[in-house]
Amino acid sequence: MSSTSTHPPRTEPMPADLRRAVHQLVAEAAMNLQDVLRYTEPDVGQDWRRMTLYRSTDAADTVDMAALLIAAYLEAAGGNVQDVRQHLQCSQQQIRADGPRESDRRRAAALLGRRPMPELPGDGEEDPWHLWTQACLHGLRARSSDDLDSLDSFLPPHIAQMARRVAEALAEPQPATA
């Protein structure tokens, strides 16, 4: 598991049991993220203050669980602990218990009209990647709950249409192509 140039990178697939566990955690995180998006909609946002924080932190915790499970597996399989920690990018971890950062406060002040809005990469609601991500999350949730009709109740029509296509594509497993 060394990252030195004398050893080629390993190319074996992820073990099936670990793969299933990671897929489950990622699906759970995606459903929590979809809930975050759902609570931003005007017709559903009656409790947005509480629910967007709950679901976004649930998603973050679930993604952390996936990363830590993979790390624990790699260590248990004989991986180099220092390499695993480096790949976990531990130095980049922002502890939520520390609360919002100054950059978060500046952006919030801009949203409240108290200062100019800072430019962020990918800003803009009509960004095609943002729309596609929303549609994927909503489509996944609708497919997993078997409730495609829910897409029409709270989503803007153009996102609902994309989400429906995603959900329909997930209706039957498609064979992987190499």
Image (cartoon, rainbow, N blue to C red):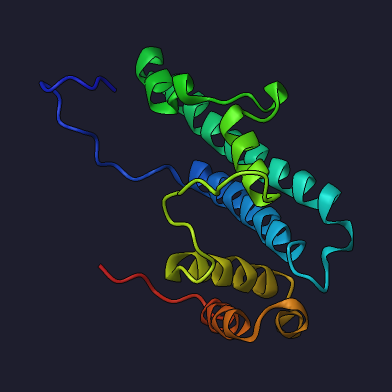
Residue depicted at x 88% and y 57%: 47
Q: Is residue 177 left or right of residue 107?
A: left
Residue 135: x and y in percent read: 56, 72
Residue 8: x and y in percent read: 15, 31
- The answer to whether one can see residue 10 in this image is yes
Q: Is residue 170 left or right of residue 88?
A: right
Query: Which corner quadrant of the image does residue 4 belong to?
Result: top left
Q: Does residue 133 lie above or below 163 as drawn?
A: above
Residue depicted at x 47% and y 21%: 90
Q: Residue lying at the far right in this picture: please name it.
A: 46
Residue depicted at x 65% and y 74%: 143
Viewer-side residue, 5 vs 178: 5
Q: Does residue 83 lie above or below 41 as drawn?
A: above
Viewer-side residue, 141 vs 42: 42
Residue 2: x and y in percent read: 25, 19
- The answer to whether one can see residue 76 in this image is no
Specify the quadrant that holds the N terminus: top left
